[in-house]
Amino acid sequence: CLAMPASAITASPMGQTLDPNTTTGSLRILNNSKGAKRYQVLVDVMSVGADGQKVFTPTTEMAFYPATVIPSLGPGKIQTLRWKRPASPGREVIYQVELREEPLDDDDAVVVTQGMSVNLRPRMLLPWAFVPPGATPVLSARHETATELVREVVNGKTVEVPRTFLYLVFENAGSATASIQKISYAGQPDPGPQLVLPGERLRLKVSASAREVKFTQKG
C-alpha cells in the first residue's frame, strides 16, 4: 500500500494570462517538505500542428535567472527566479512551464511496505499565456465516431484490427486559448482542466454519447 503525500512543490504564479508586450516577471518556488530538494525549470512553447493537435516544442526564448536549475533548496526555503522573454505583439503565445523536483535526501521518502521506501519526483505544469487585447476563444463541442486500427493478439499472432471509438471533440475557432473545466458528458468521469488552443481540435475519448455537454470556460 503506497500512501501518496501532498506535493511538496508550491509555485507562484501558477496559470496566468499576461499582455503580449510583457517581457519580464518572476517565479516563486517554496519547498514545504521535510528534506532538501533540487528543482529544474523547463519551458515548451505550445502550438497546434497540421492535424489540429497540440505540439510542445522546447524553447529557450523564456530564460530564467539566476539559472533554470536550483541545485539545493532547504525545507521551508523560498527561491525567486526572474524570467525574461521577447515581446510578441499582436499574437498569442502560450508556454508550458514545467517545474521538476528531485529529492536530495530520504527525509521525504514514502514507505511502501515492509520497510521499503521510494523517493517521489513530482512535477508541476504551469500554463502561461500572453494574449493580445481583443483576442477571444470561439469554442464548439461535438460528438465524433472514428474507426482506428489497434494491435491485438488473435490466434497467437499480433494483428491490426479495426475498432470504433467515441470522442468528445472541442474546437477553438477563435484567436485566444480557451481554458475549460468541470466537463460533464454522458456520465463520464471529469477529465480535469483542459486548454484548447486557437485552431486546435481537442479529442477526449469517451465510452458513451449524449445530446448535451456541460463545462465552465475561462478566457
Image: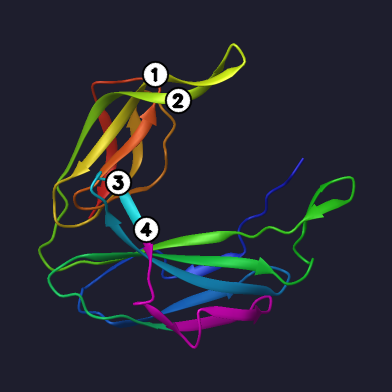
Dot 3 alpha-carbon crowd within 10 angstroms: few under 14, some 14 to 19, many 20 or more: some
Q: Pointer 2: what residue?
A: 150
Instruction: Identify residue for label 4.
Output: 56
Going by the picture, which residue comes out furthest to the right?
A: 114
Contact between labelled residues 2 and 1, with CB atoms less than 8 Å apart:
yes
Q: Which of marks 1 and 2 is nearer the N terminus?
A: 2
State which region is magenta: 57-81
Instruction: Let me know if residue 69 is in the magenta part.
Output: yes
- Give the spatial CA distance, label 4 vs label 1: 29 Å
Q: Name the residue under label 3.
A: 53
Identified by mark 2, the residue type is: Val
Mark 3–mark 2 distance (CA, rounded to whole Å):
20 Å
Q: Quadrant of residue 154?
A: top right
Depth-wise, is mark 3 or mark 2 nearer the camera? 2
Residue 116: image x %, image y %?
85, 50
Name the secondary structure under disc 4: strand
